[in-house]
Image: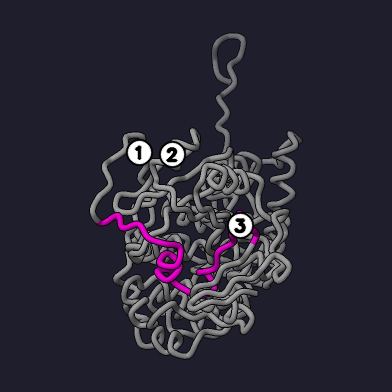
Amino acid sequence: MREREGVRVLERSQHCLSRSEISENALKVLYRLHRSGFTAYLVGGAVRDLLLRRRPKDFDVGTNARPQQVRHLFRNARLIGRRFRLARVVFGNEVVEVATFRRSPEPPEMEDGETSDVLAPPSESEEFGTPEEDARRRDFTVNGLFYNIADFTVIDYVGGLEDLEAGLIRTIGPARERIGEDPVRMMRAVEYGARLGFRLDGPLEEAIGDMAAEIHRAAPARIAYELMESLRGGQALPIFQAFERHGLLQQLLPETARTAASPRAGLLWGLLGRADAFARAGSPLPEAALWAALLAPELVGWLGAQGADGSAFERAVRDLTGALATRLVLSHHTAHLVRNTFLCLWRLARPPRGGKFVLRTMRQEGFEAALRLAQALTEDGAFPRHSLSVWQEAIQRARSGLPPVPERPAPGRRRPRRRRGRRQNTAGGTA
């Protein structure tokens, strides 16, 4: 290990990070930059996860090459962002993000989604920097580690290695200042702690407790994105329990926080636990089902109740899903899918009325999400098991092309009697 003022360097023999664990495409990017004379580091969460012997979700690269130079090196690169430009190098389904080292903190509302084929001139705000300056502008120490492809060393400017060994989430710089720059960091701190099994640094935990309401300064779309990332990553249960524990759930999802503080909390946590099990088994719940799972405990009482009013249920669904969609600025399509998931769930809670009814229901948007959610609810005893079994059999028949079950009239409706005409005799008179 080499240490000099402000930096700790682990030689290849002193750490467990191996090139064999880095994606082939990320290695292509690193080596092309290096062989072209640029500094090229693997950065951020990938280094953290590999040192913890976890599989990274994605691979990001830091370099002293300017965005235009990166684009020149990679024909499959797209430049995005207005204020701070970075390159996305696309390899089929994998994207490797390449960012130039810079000194300024990342702006909270970075235009990640904007792409351009026409290069704009560098703006004065595009302040490029050194690797050390780049490390110190990041959010948490465990995310400020670099892996140098030139000599396979791990470089630490911010104390991330020590915090990684201690299982600690700590901000780079004063916690209140870093949260003030970007309130979404509160969500990420809690998520990292729950996902990695780490504890929050004392000043960070105190700052989150005092500043939880500041989350409303963040763009709703960013909050929705972070929530969905937490829901579908296979560890939604510990993350959302941590959101509640640190006072964020009440600010983010008051309906879900109300459930968590009620006798229905067990159903909420059970649903999230089953969503995690599905994700880890490689069969994650659809996005609409995950949003619906956060609201389902408030509505399941209607599903198994005999004689429940369908119109009242639909109004309750519209109220709950409408509030969620408005707060998080969900797209109209997403809001429609979540609402339809509950309406299909209502149908699944009652035996089907026949083959045509089954086919019509199966064609509804949100049906697959409702079916998966019904399966999860059944495991917790919150959904009529018999109705689900009948539906599953009917669905299997419909999908396999077997003759459908006979159509039967809806409950309370009588089949209309067929009127018979009066017989005519051969003479033209009536019989």
Specify which label sits upstream in the sequence, 3 or 1. 1
Q: Which mark is residue 71?
A: 2
Specify which label sits upstream in the sequence, 2 or 3. 2
Residue 4 in percent (x, y) is at 53, 76
Query: Number of callouts in the render?
Result: 3
Q: Which mark is residue 285?
A: 3
Say which residue appears at 57% left-offset and 54% top-offset: 59
Q: Which mark is residue 116?
A: 1
Q: CA distance from mark 3 to mark 1?
A: 34 Å
Which residue in the rendered view is the most extreme toward the left?
124
Say which residue appears at 56% left-offset and 82% top-offset: 168
Amino acid type at mark 2: Arg
Q: CA distance from mark 2 to mark 3?
A: 37 Å
Residue 223 in percent (x, y) is at 40, 65
Q: Which residues are magenta?
A: 125-152
Residue 280: name its quadrant. Answer: bottom right
Which residue in the rendered view is the most extreme toward the top?
427
Which numbered disc, 2 or 1, marks the residue closer to the eye? 2
Q: CA distance from mark 2 to mark 1?
A: 11 Å
* Magenta stretch encompasses residue 132: yes
Amino acid type at mark 1: Ser
Say which residue appears at 58% left-offset and 42% top-offset: 93
Q: Quadrant of the N terminus?
A: bottom right
For this rendering, which residue is in front, 79 or 111? 79
* Magenta stretch encompasses residue 38: no
